[in-house]
Image (cartoon, rainbow, N blue to C red):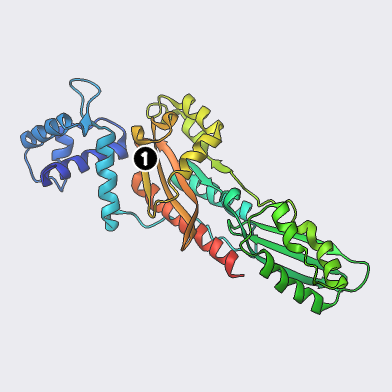
């Protein structure tokens, strides 16, 4: 258990190292405004923190740098004190269901998040295998043109337009919407299951024939972005200024190329209700244990659909990363809620 003095000194060391990237000496810590203790006291506490595994030093005469445990202490302090987090930077990320499909919304989120944080941004799309039919709309666009819109529980939207040889009765279109929602809502996305629900011997020839024409909109239905991990900004980790902070960048690039493994790692956090942070050795995937991951889940009030995150060196701006992924996850959640409210 750290004392209040040790917590203050450790926080000062981590913050300065995050800002400057150089080992932090006792004099640099003692000169900070919030440090009220002498240099000798600071040196003694730094030695105790190093012995406790929170700090280390690259050379005997050098200052200290945080360990994974030191970063973990710092992150927990940030998460516990909202007033220490910065105001989210304007991202221009205002997703509108009227202008974007799911795939485009996720891509825009990934790009904006990487740009704001200067880190690799990752967003996992909702998994198709757990998706069901959420709602169906049958719309009469023109006298002979009908569009079928299928909204899946993972937010995926499928549209299909049908042109008939003769004018379609508006009453038939309205009936089809009601019938299809009653029969298919909540059903898993699968051709055999959906097809069986469209067959009803009690239907008249006109109704049955109309459903037969519309059936291709439901058979082999595929939601966009299934089992997909969107990544943006990988080149940022290969920049010259990041070389010292990422000694294993090549291995990390190989991990990103095998996106399915990173996707599984993200999916393992779907039950978390708030921001999650994996620091170094805490990462579930071995190839990621030289970096930190800051993430947050997005979805509906009753169910998480996917995760938004950033990945970068252990020496990252955790405060900005936390507020940025939280803001991006909130915006994606609002987007998916809009999909359902239409």
Q: Tell me: residue 16, above or below residue 63.
A: below
Q: Is residue 64 left or right of residue 219?
A: left
Q: Is residue 195 visible?
A: yes
Give x and y (percent) for residue 258. 55, 31
Which element carries disc 1, helix, strand or loop? strand
Q: Is residue 118 left or right of residue 79?
A: right
Name the residue at the front extreme. Answer: 201
Depth check: give the residue in front, 205 or 342: 205
Depth check: give the residue in front, 96 or 32: 96
Give x and y (percent) for residue 188. 63, 55
Category of crowding for the residue at label 1, using alpha-carbon neighbours closer than 10 angstroms: few (below 14), some (14–19), many (at least 20): some
The residue at the point 44 percent across, 43 percent down is 268
Q: Quick one: quadrant of the N terminus? A: top left
Q: Is residue 15 visible?
A: no
Name the residue at the top extreme. Answer: 60
Q: Quick one: quadrant of the C terminus? A: bottom right
Give x and y (percent) for residue 221. 71, 53
Give x and y (percent) for residue 88. 40, 56
The residue at the point 50 percent across, 39 percent down is 264
Q: Is residue 291 left or right of residue 13?
A: right
Q: Tell me: residue 232, above or below residue 335.
A: above
Total marks placed = 1
Name the residue at the right extreme. Answer: 165
The residue at the point 45 percent across, 46 percent down is 309
Q: Determine which residue is flagged by label 1.
A: 278
- Indicate the quadrant where residue 136 lies: bottom right
């Amino acid at each position: 258990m750290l004392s209040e003095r040790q917590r203050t000194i450790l926080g000062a060391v981590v913050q300065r190292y995050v800002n400057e990237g150089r080992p932090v000496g006792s004099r640099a810590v003692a000169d900070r405004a919030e440090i009220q203790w002498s240099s000798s006291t600071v040196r003694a506490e730094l030695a105790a923190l190093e012995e406790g595994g929170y700090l280390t030093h690259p050379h005997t005469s050098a200052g200290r740098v945080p360990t994974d445990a030191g970063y973990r202490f710092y992150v927990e302090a940030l998460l516990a004190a909202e007033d220490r987090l910065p105001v989210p930077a304007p991202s221009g990320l205002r997703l509108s269901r009227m202008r974007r499909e799911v795939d485009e919304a996720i891509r825009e989120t990934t790009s904006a998040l990487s740009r704001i944080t200067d880190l690799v941004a990752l967003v996992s799309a909702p998994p198709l295998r757990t998706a069901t039919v959420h709602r169906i709309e049958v719309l009469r666009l023109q006298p002979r043109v009908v569009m079928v819109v299928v909204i899946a529980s993972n937010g995926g939207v499928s549209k299909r337009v049908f042109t008939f040889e003769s004018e379609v009765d508006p009453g038939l279109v309205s009936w089809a919407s009601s019938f299809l929602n009653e029969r298919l809502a909540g059903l898993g996305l699968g051709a055999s299951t959906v097809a069986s629900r469209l067959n009803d011997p009690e239907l008249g020839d006109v109704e049955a024939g109309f459903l037969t024409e519309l059936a291709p909109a439901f058979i082999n239905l595929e939601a966009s972005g299934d089992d997909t991990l969107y990544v943006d900004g990988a080149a940022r980790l290969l920049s010259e200024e990041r070389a010292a902070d990422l000694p294993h960048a090549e291995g990390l690039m190989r991990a990103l190329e095998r996106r399915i493994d990173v996707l599984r790692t993200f999916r393992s956090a779907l039950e978390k209700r708030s921001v999650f942070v994996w620091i170094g050795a805490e990462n579930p995937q071995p190839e990621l244990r030289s970096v930190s991951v800051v993430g947050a889940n997005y979805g509906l009030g009753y169910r998480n659909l996917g995760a938004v995150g950033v990945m970068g060196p252990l020496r990252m701006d955790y405060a900005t990363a936390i507020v940025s992924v939280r803001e991006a996850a909130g915006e994606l959640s609002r987007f998916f809620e809009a999909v359902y409210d239409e």
